[in-house]
Every structure is written in structure tokens, then in C-alpha cells.
Amino acid sequence: MQPPLIIAISGASGSGKSLFTENLINAFSEYHKPVRVLREDHYYRAQDHLSMPEREKNNYDHPDAFEHELLKAHLSALRSGQPIDYPHYCFNTHTRLPDTERLNPAPVIILEGIMLLTRAELLPLYDVKIFIDTPLDICLMRRMLRDVKERGRTLESIAEQYEATVKPMYHQYIEPSRFTADVVVTQGGENQIALDVIKSHIQQVLQ
Ligand SMILES: Nc1ncnc2c1ncn2[C@@H]1O[C@H](COP(=O)(O)OP(=O)(O)O)[C@@H](O)[C@H]1O
Ligand SMILES: Nc1ccn([C@@H]2O[C@H](COP(=O)(O)O)[C@@H](O)[C@H]2O)c(=O)n1
């Protein structure tokens, strides 16, 4: 069996990675190749041993917040045709859920997450590296709306976390990782030309 094509999509929180991923999947639907999506967020470290106030204080915008060793092992397994036990994460409790999900390999694997391009040891595992480059003020505005609605946050906590970790870590880790990307996408998840270009590259590779 041919190894899967692995596409990594990175960029700031709120840059439109999830939306771009959804649109890329839709673009694939006519091509009849099963696509599997893995979210780096699911690889945030389990923190069951910490109290809630301790969890709330943590820096979730540092590469070490993620169990990248597990992600790397999972990518290697999928590449060699083995299934994985995909972890699930809860943003409200800041830790992993007890259950995992058995996932089989697929011809196309899309990975999505903020720190995917920051680890030198992960880069060789990706076939295509994409960076969604969206101005930070737009990312923050989107994040505020989403985190209040979906992640149980208050505006005060979002503003505090943004100043303390999200913004400085973006400049330290995420922004420099842009230069490792094959494609930098401006105008976020709705950039149709970028979607078409990437789709046509992927079609050529898969033929
Ligand atoms: N181009 C866009 N125009 C309007 N809203 C957008 C756009 N891109 C993303 N959003 C919205 O902003 C929020 C964050 O986008 P999302 O794709 O989840 O970002 P990320 O995965 O990078 O954190 C979501 O509610 C999404 O629907
Ligand atoms: N317990 C957590 C874990 C992560 N975060 C924030 O999530 C952001 C990354 O996820 P996106 O879907 O927005 O890319 C990251 O910036 C962390 O600050 C959190 O708030 N709590």
C-alpha cells in the first residue's frame, strides 16, 4: 500500500486553520479519496494530576504543552499502515478525555495545529506544509467570539491569556515557523485560489 500523503496546516490561533481544512476536505470530496483529519489540539498533554487553578495558569502556547512524541509515533504508524488510538481533549477542563478513538490509515491525512511547524523533528514527516497567515488582530477577534461560545471562556480571561502567553508565544514560535512552509496562505480559510492550487498539487501527487 502507498504511504499516505500528509498535509500540515499551521498558523496562529483563530487564523482560519479549521475553516481552511474543512474547505480542503470539501475540495477533495469530488476526488473520492478518503481524508483523515488529525488536530494537534488533541495532543495537548493530560493534566489530571493538576488542580483547576493550576491548569488555568498553564502556558498552552508553548511547544512543550503538546505531546509531540505521541503525534510523531502516530504519524509513523499511519505511514506504515497501522491504526492509531487518537486522544480526545477537553478545552473546558484543560485535559484529555478518558476515551481514545481507533483510527485507520487513509490515503490523505490533514494535520492542523499552531505548533506543527515549530519542531524540526516533525517536519520531515509532512509532504505539504501550509501556513495560514492572518493579521493577529483579526485572529484575536475571532478567538474571542469562538472561545466565549465554544470553550467556556470569559472576555477577561481571553484578554489576560492573550497578553500573558498567546501573543508573546506567537512571536517567539509560530511566526518564525512560517518560513518552513511550502505555501503561505493569506486571507484565511476562504482563499479559493490557494485551495485550488493546493488541491491541484495534491491531485497530481496522488495519481
Ligand atoms: N475568512 C473568515 N471569515 C470569517 N470568519 C472566519 C474566517 N476564517 C475563520 N473564521 C471564523 O473564525 C473562527 C476561528 O477560525 P478557525 O478556523 O476555527 O481558526 P483556527 O482553527 O486557526 O483557530 C471560527 O469561528 C471561524 O468560523
Ligand atoms: N487548555 C487549553 C488548551 C489550549 N488553549 C488555547 O488553544 C489555542 C490553540 O487552539 P486553536 O484551535 O485556537 O488553534 C492556543 O492558542 C491556546 O492558547 C487554551 O486556551 N486552553
Image (cartoon, rainbow, N blue to C red):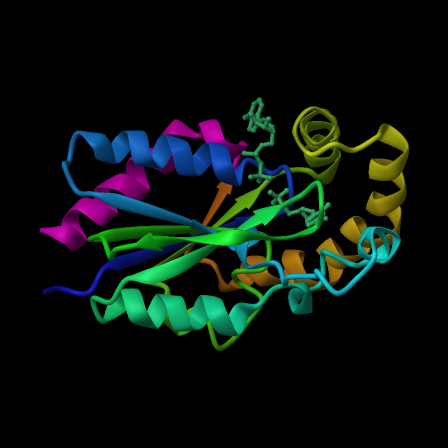
In the picture, measured across the screen, residue 145 lies left or right of residue 45, that is right
Instruction: Give x and y (percent) for residue 146.
Output: 67, 28
Q: Residue at x 17, y 42 (%)?
A: 33
Q: Residue at x 65, y 29 (%)?
A: 150
Q: Residue furthest bottom?
A: 121
Q: Is residue 198 magenta?
A: yes
- The image quarter containing residue 68 is bottom right
Instruction: Give x and y (percent) for residue 125.
Output: 37, 69
In the picture, measured across the screen, residue 200 lies left or right of residue 54, that is left
Nearer-the-camera pick, 75 or 167: 75
In the picture, measured across the screen, residue 146 lies left or right of residue 54, that is left
85 up-or-down from 136: above or below: below
Instruction: Give x and y (percent) for residue 39.
Output: 48, 50
32 up-or-down from 124: above or below: above
Q: Main secondary structure of the magenta part?
A: helix
Q: Residue furthest front?
A: 98
Segment tinted magenta in the rendering: 186-207
Nearer-the-camera pick, 123 or 153: 153
The N terminus, quarter of image: bottom left
Nearer-the-camera pick, 96 or 14: 96
Q: Residue at x 21, y 43 (%)?
A: 34
Instruction: Give x and y (percent) for residue 187.
Output: 54, 32
Q: Is residue 189 magenta?
A: yes
Q: Residue at x 86, y 58 (%)?
A: 54
Nearer-the-camera pick, 179 or 52: 52
- Number of marks in picture: 0
- The image quarter containing residue 177 is bottom right
105 up-or-down from 22: above or below: below
